Structures are given as structure tokens and as C-alpha cells.
Amino acid sequence: MATYTVTDDIISSPQAAVHFSTSDRRVLIGMRATLEMLGIPVPEYAKRKPTGRPPSRVIAAAYAADNPSQAPAPLTYKRHQPTRPRA
């Protein structure tokens, strides 16, 4: 059985990033699965995003870091507003 050396030069290229970002997302999912099964590092453009909604505190901290001159508004929960009786 022949042994082949595999490099990730082509899959990590900017052209591959453009190709996979414009193609069907199922193609990207298949490429990511193939790389994970073969033990090849997944390029940054193909990595999965964290599941769920991003935490608001992280977003507020990132905004505060980008805008140091503006004080961020405090994060509070909305209180339940009782419904008004119909007139």
C-alpha cells in the first residue's frame, strides 16, 4: 500500500476560503468533517461558531474595549409590564 504525504497548503489558501464561503454550506460541513476525520487541522475560516446566542456581557465588554471614551449602559433585565385593561 502506498503512503501519501498530505499538506494543508491548498485548503488554507485565501482562494479556498473564498470558494468555501461562497459555496453551499453543506460543502463546508463535509470539508470540515473530512479534515477532522483525517486529523488535519481545520482552517480558521471553516471552524464552527459557538452554539447559541452570544452572551450580552461579552458583547458589552467588546464594545467598551472598542469605544473607551463612551461609558456603556448597564445591563438590566426588563421587568414584566402588566397588561392594561381594555377600554
Image: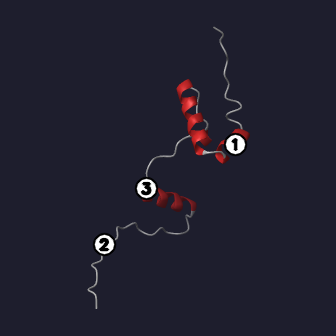
CB under 8 Å between callouts 2 and 3?
no
Counting residues from the start of the chain, the first of labels 2 and 3 encountered is 3
Residue sitting at 51 percent across and 62 percent down? 64
**Nearer mark to the viewer, of 2 and 1:** 1
Q: Could you say which quadrant of the image residue 2 lies in?
A: top right
Give the image location of residue 49, x and y in percent.
Answer: 51, 46
Badge 3 amino acid: Pro
Q: Secondary structure at mark 3?
A: loop
- Mark 3 packing: few (<14 Cα in 10 Å), some, or many (20+)? few
Confirm or deny contact between disc 2 and disc 1 (CB under 8 A).
no
Image point (43%, 55%), residue name = 55
Give whichever of discs 1 and 3 has the lower sequence position.
Answer: 1
Of the two numbered discs 1 and 3 in the rendering, the one whose residue sits closer to the viewer:
1
State the quadrant of the N terminus.
top right
Q: Residue at x 70, y 42 (%)?
A: 19
Instruction: Tell me the tag on residue 19.
Output: 1
Q: Is residue 41 above or below residue 64?
A: above
Q: Nearer the viewer, residue 85 or 43?
A: 85
Residue marked by disc 2: 79
Q: Amino acid at mark 1?
A: His
Residue 43 location, quadrant: top right
Q: Residue at x 40, y 66 (%)?
A: 75
Which residue was labeled with disc 3? 55
Tell me the element at label 2: loop
Task: Tell me residue 42's x, y (percent).
Answer: 58, 34
Tag 2: amino acid = Arg
Query: Marks 2 and 1, Cα distance to the nearest angstrom?
Result: 47 Å
Image vertical order of residue 82 relative to residue 69, above or below: below
Q: Position of residue 87 (x, y in %)?
A: 28, 91
Q: Residue furthest right?
A: 15
